[in-house]
């Protein structure tokens, strides 16, 4: 029997062994040795279970040793079921032995039940706790990772918000400053072009004198000469304006564009600067302002006058005198705003009137204004001009009577010689000189009319160039901010997703922890209870 139990203990890790001492009803015939024998058997059985088999502790072994009588237990059960028995008489102490058998059944049932529970559920509980622990560890990693990534995304979102706000503020400031700078530069260019063009118009005679081609007075050649002169003046003025203005305006344009590019480059995000460096570099070619004077249209109404006119003729002298002194009388007679009534003022004496010389005193007494005296002088000079021949005859007769005929003859000869000299020198070269003088006067007058228009066109070119450059840079900034807005939206979506992931991981981790706790309670309640 011991060998059998040893084999069982080697085959089964924790066998449930109970020892039943049967036929214990025989001890009723020897009551004086009952306790001694029972103690002896009990000690041997405890030693066998605890020391030899090592399946339980000595205390547990005492609970697995029973002293019974199978025959008495069977008879008692049959009586309980009201079945006939052949030997109804039982030995003394049979009830104690029967109760011990019932106790064996109860303990054996409990042991088998507990063994079954441990056999069926201990492994599952242990596996469940391992799975719960692994899930908790994985979810802890997920939760920590999601939390860390969420914190990084939130920080990135803050940085993007600050960058966008800074770019918008700086762009607003730069836009306002650049608009003011462009306006100042446009005004400066307009003033420079206007001043330079006015100076070149005053030097137009030198430019016209540089044009030296054969001059003839026939109509076909004269028209061709004027067209060529138009082109020469237009080309010369344009080249002079470019020479004087292009370098200065070009330098200002380059500096303005460079300043725009640098300021826009500085507000770009650092990772965008490398890609935008080549894009925002200003034009390498120098800026040139286009000057379109179009002398053909400006001087289309120019009509030359190449007829001979004696420089010292009576008409010429009167015209010269008229040009210099036509308004001299009016200038010497300021307007009289206060009139003294005739009844109060005393009439001037004849002596005072005699001493009053010149038209000024006459005007003060007559009461004519400056405009009226100018009109009177023009009529008087016109009358003298229209009657130049009669005036010449009267002057000649007066001189003849006053200085004598010799002086008059010598003066007439000199006057005739001077006339002949001028007539002989009225060559094609002189006609060309007169033509150029007339052309310079007419062209200067016409060019002065377009000074404001030309300067406005040049300033408009500068404004267009700078505005185009600034718009191109603003578009680059808009592209960068659009990318940052897109990135910001992606960051917000990532934050939302990570928040959801961390919340779910936290909930699942808590559920796994709750499951592990429930399994611990199950172990404590059913598996660890002896």
Image (cartoon, grey):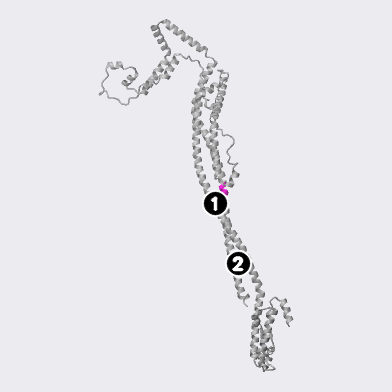
* Measured Cα–Cα span from mark 1 to mark 2: 37 Å
Q: Which mark is residue 159?
A: 1
**Residue 81: image x %, image y %?**
65, 89
**Residue 172: image x %, image y %?**
50, 44
State left or right for residue 93 relative to residue 355.
right
Q: Is residue 461 among what the camera can see?
A: no
Note whether 204 is above or below 258 in the view shown.
Answer: above
Badge 2: residue crowd in 10 Å (few <14, some 14–19, many ≥20) = many
Give yes or no for residue 312 being in the magenta stretch.
no
State left or right for residue 329 relative to residue 234.
left
Mark 1 or mark 2: whose residue is earlier in sequence: 1
Q: Where the C terminus falls, by quadrant?
A: bottom right
**Residue 234: image x %, image y %?**
55, 26
Residue 7 occupies which quadrant of the picture? Answer: bottom right
- Tell me the magenta residue range: 480-486
In the rendered image, which residue does mark 2 sit on? 512
Note whether 268 is above or below 320 in the view shown.
Answer: below
Q: Nearer the viewer, residue 494 or 24?
A: 24
Residue at x-position 43% and y-position 5%? 406
Q: Secondary structure at mark 2?
A: helix
Residue 411 occupies which quadrant of the picture? Answer: top left
Residues at discs 1 and 2 in contact (Cβ within 8 Å): no
Residue at x-position 59% and y-position 70%? 517
Q: Is residue 165 among what the camera can see?
A: yes
Note whether 126 is above or below 364 in the view shown.
Answer: below
**Residue 516: image x %, image y %?**
61, 69
């Amino acid at each position: 029997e011991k060998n059998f139990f040893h084999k069982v203990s080697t085959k089964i890790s924790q066998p449930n062994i109970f020892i039943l001492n049967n036929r214990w009803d025989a001890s009723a015939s020897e009551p004086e040795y009952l306790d001694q024998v029972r103690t002896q058997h009990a000690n041997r059985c405890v030693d066998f279970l605890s020391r030899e088999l090592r399946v339980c502790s000595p205390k547990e072994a005492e609970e697995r040793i029973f002293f019974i009588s199978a025959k008495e237990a069977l008879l008692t059960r049959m009586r309980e079921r009201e079945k006939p028995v052949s030997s109804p008489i039982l030995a003394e102490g049979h009830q104690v032995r029967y109760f011990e058998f019932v106790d064996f059944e109860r303990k054996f049932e409990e042991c088998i039940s507990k063994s079954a529970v441990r056999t069926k559920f201990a492994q599952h509980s242990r596996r469940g706790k391992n799975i719960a622990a692994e899930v908790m560890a994985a979810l802890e990693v997920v939760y920590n990772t999601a939390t860390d990534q969420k914190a990084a995304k939130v920080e990135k979102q803050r940085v993007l918000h600050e960058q966008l706000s800074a770019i918008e503020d700086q762009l607003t400031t730069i836009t306002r400053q650049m608009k003011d700078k462009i306006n100042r530069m446009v005004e400066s260019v307009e003033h420079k072009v206007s001043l330079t063009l006015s100076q070149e118009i005053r030097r137009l005679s030198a430019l016209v004198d540089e044009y030296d081609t054969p001059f003839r007075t026939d109509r076909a050649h004269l028209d061709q000469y004027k067209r060529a002169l138009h082109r020469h003046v237009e080309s010369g003025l344009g080249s002079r304006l470019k020479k004087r203005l292009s370098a200065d305006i070009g330098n200002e344009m380059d500096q303005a564009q460079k300043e725009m590019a640098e300021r826009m480059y500085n507000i770009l995000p650092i990772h965008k600067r490398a890609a935008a460096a080549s894009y925002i570099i200003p034009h390498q070619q120098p800026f040139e302002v286009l000057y379109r004077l179009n002398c053909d249209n400006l001087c289309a109404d120019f009509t030359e006058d190449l007829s001979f006119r004696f420089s010292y003729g009576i008409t010429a002298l009167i015209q010269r005198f008229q040009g210099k002194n036509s308004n001299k009388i009016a200038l010497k007679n300021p307007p009289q705003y206060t009139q003294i009534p005739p009844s109060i003022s005393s009439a001037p004496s004849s002596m005072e009137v005699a001493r009053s010389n010149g038209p000024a005193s006459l005007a003060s007494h007559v009461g004519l204004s400056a405009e009226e005296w100018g009109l009177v002088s023009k009529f008087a000079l016109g009358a003298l001009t229209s009657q130049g021949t009669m005036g010449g005859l009267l002057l000649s007769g007066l001189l003849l009577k006053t200085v004598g005929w010799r002086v008059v003859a010598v003066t007439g000869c000199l006057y005739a010689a001077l006339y002949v000299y001028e007539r002989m020198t009225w060559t094609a070269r002189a006609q060309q000189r007169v033509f150029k003088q007339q052309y310079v006067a007419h062209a200067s007058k016409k060019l002065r009319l377009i000074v404001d228009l030309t300067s406005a066109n040049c300033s408009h070119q500068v404004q267009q160039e700078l505005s185009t450059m600034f718009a191109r840079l603003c578009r680059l900034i808009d592209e960068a901010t659009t990318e940052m807005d897109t990135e910001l939206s992606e960051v917000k979506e990532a934050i939302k997703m990570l928040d959801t992931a961390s919340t779910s991981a936290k909930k699942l981790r808590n559920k796994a922890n709750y499951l592990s706790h429930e399994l611990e309670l199950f172990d404590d309640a059913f598996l660890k209870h002896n």
